Image (cartoon, helix red, strand yellow):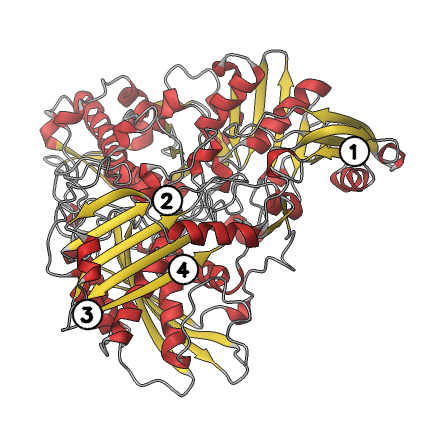
Amino acid sequence: MNILTNPSKLRGFEKHVKIENVSRRSVLKGLGLAGGFVLAAPVMTRQAFAYETGAGQMPHGTVVDPRVFVSIASDGIVTIIAHRAEMGTGVRTSLPMIVAEEMEADWKRVRVQQAHGDEVKYGNQDTDGSRSTRHYLIPMRQIGASARTMLEQAAAKRWGVPATEVKAVDHEVVHTASGRKLGFGELAADAAKQSVPSVEGLKLKDPKDFRYLGKGEISMVDLHDITTGAARYGADVRLPSMKYAVIARPPVTGGKVVSFDGSEAMKVSGVEKVLEVKGWPWPSKFQPLGGVAVIARNTGAAIKGRDALKITWDDGPNAKYDSIAYRGQLEEAARKPGLVVRKEGDVDAALKGADKVIVGEYYLPHLAHVAMEPPVAVADVKGDKAEIWAPVQSAGGTREDVAKTLDIPQENVTVNVTLLGGGFGRKSKCDFALEAALLSKELGAPVKVQWTREDDIRNGFLHTVSVERVEAGLDKGGKVIAWRHRSVAPSIASTFAAGTVHQAPFELGMGLVDMPFEIANVQCENPEAAAHTRVGWFRSVSNIPRAFAVQSMVAEIAQATNRDPKDMLLELVGAPRILNLTSVKDLWNYGEPYESYPIDTGRLRKVVELVADKGGWGRAVPKGHGLGIAAHRSFVSYIATIVEVAVDEKGKLTVPRVDTAIDCGTYVNPERIQSQIEGTAIMGLSLAKYGAITFKDGKVQQGNFDDFPVIRIDESPGVTNVYIVPPGPDTPPSGVGEPGVPPFAPALINAIFAATGKRIRELPIGKQLEA
């Protein structure tokens, strides 16, 4: 543990927790000692070591060391490091709260500091994949238990009694025999001298003694600053003598500058310089696209200067990319055999012998993240040292990439993480930070690179376009005996390697090869699809098109056989069992060991049954209303959603109510679970109603919220109810931030069918409901 020698630096935070950046805190320098419905609180075994996660397989793994994550000042203030990025999930609260729980620290006397990028020191810092709680519940408990043990050992030594006679309770260590007490602050210096206990010998708290975990009584540490306007986002960073830059990037992915004339830009008041920005040939991971930068005394002048630029572009190999034509290519590919990635039984024979075959083709266009805060970064490069301030999801990854791009030692790069105004996967790609670093090096001054909304939409890493074709064969009794699913979509792997035409195992494992239905003959295929723009991960990634296709098909089968959609879904899920997908090569399970996180159809059934019960499935609804249901497993969580829609005579769509049941295993903060599910309902409705990025002549045709809308307050679901399944005693934590998105669109579409009799197979809905 670090011992803060100047506790006055931490005072004045009694009403709320202040967030600061570790690298900027002078007190740490040179310290050698240094409404929803919840069913039940989480249940954990006493030691909670009954499962393993994939945390150790992530780059740099985990670090379990209280000296890295915990500081105690002499006045008793406990400071806990948050090494993940905060973008609304509450991770900057949840992980420190786990430490505080095991430490027996009083949350009112806890302060949270944001870690800078340093994966050697802190372990993996990638805040994506809904991994933070599932990978760090146990490590954070161990860190807290280690700190508590060191405090108890220090007290026992001072009193000259066995450590078994002392116990940490509510920010103090108590000698149970005599009633003597010492506060954490009084013991801090001595505790720091204790050896860090071995993980194997740690005794974790009994869950029945938890004060914080699972209670939902602690608000986000950022909430006060966010609501009062004091929160520090990327765009709020200011440095002395800082320059402001915007960049004109190639309008077509893979394009480059042929020539430019900046003379008119230089006439704009405040513009100081125009220069070309280095770009990397596509594909090039997260490296900048290149282009022409306008440097000015403020962002407004830089934007005006950019508008005045005259640039001749070479649009490169993607100059003819056209969304309409490309959709046709994807549909043609989906109607022909493709690479077989899962095969059980004989699908061809079963389909040929089926009494009825139902075919559905489902289309989803490219999507943009459109986080409320567009990308922005500040860089200050001096010689072989660089410091970055940015809203990045991967501070450690950004540090590595900045070092490589500038060809300087990684230890010379400091990445300060600001609050993220939304991320959804976009800000795990650090191209905007690399742009700022390159410009700062070139100019010899601090530089802020600000992306506009148009930049964000036209030059981002888009969610892939997709055609999903499902063929279901039924026998005379209406039982599904054959299932063939062809998924055609450009792969995220195309961002890293040229010539990629098949989806990667991690994409195939998102609702395609892991489809959990009990069907005798199953075949999944992946025809070829080349990328023509930058493709990146997006909240819930390939689960979006897969859930849309699979769960829409379930409802279509129910309609064709005159069955209730919920009953049809449960019939297809089948009996509770653990799937044994031996026919799938390289089965991807969200990076988790299958022994700890198997595909458990019993848990999937349970969320369907729970939401049907609590959400009133089958209840009477007014004319023009309909109910739809869908369920999906993603990020090793199980989730089911019922959407109620209302469609008026003119085709106007509203959503009066959404009910969602989630089984995310052991959980920390139910308030954040409810918030995330509410958010996915809003995002899911936005994408389903409006989400479409289209291309013509290689260029994105959208640019702002006028042509890529998000739903407004008056369009949001009227009520979103959330039901959390109580975990079993050894159920590990799983994902929350992403799993709510995939089932929303199919539940919505199924509800529209129930209300109108119209089956929608392509998104967005757009004008398809208009009379």
Disc 2 to disc 3, C-alpha distance? 27 Å
12 left or right of 70 in image: right
* Nearer to us: label 1 or label 2: 2
Disc 3 to disc 1, C-alpha distance? 72 Å
Asked if labels 4 and 3 touch by Cβ distance under 8 angstroms, the answer is: no
Disc 3 to disc 4, C-alpha distance? 23 Å
Disc 4 to disc 1, C-alpha distance? 49 Å
Is 161 situated above or below 723?
above
The residue that appears at 59% across and 44% down in the rendered structure is 321
Element type at marker 3?
Answer: loop
Specify which label sits upstream in the sequence, 3 or 4. 3
721 left or right of 440 in image: left
* Nearer to us: label 4 or label 1: 4
Disc 2 to disc 4, C-alpha distance? 15 Å
* Nearer to us: label 3 or label 4: 3
Asked if labels 2 and 1 touch by Cβ distance under 8 angstroms, the answer is: no
Asked if labels 1 and 3 touch by Cβ distance under 8 angstroms, the answer is: no
Label number found at residue 355: 3
In this rendered view, identify the residue nearer to me: 83 or 52. 52
Element type at marker 4?
Answer: strand
Residues packed near mark 2 inside 10 Å, few (<14), some (14 to 19) or many (20 plus): many
Specify which label sits upstream in the sequence, 3 or 1. 1
Read off the residue under disc 4: 362
Q: Amino acid at mark 3?
A: Asp
Disc 1 to disc 2, C-alpha distance? 51 Å
Read off the residue under disc 1: 297
Percent across and percent down for residue 760 are: 43, 69
Label number found at residue 409: none
Percent across and percent down for residue 596 are: 16, 40
Read off the residue under disc 2: 527
Q: Amino acid at mark 2?
A: Pro
In this rendered view, identify the residue nearer to me: 479 or 61. 479
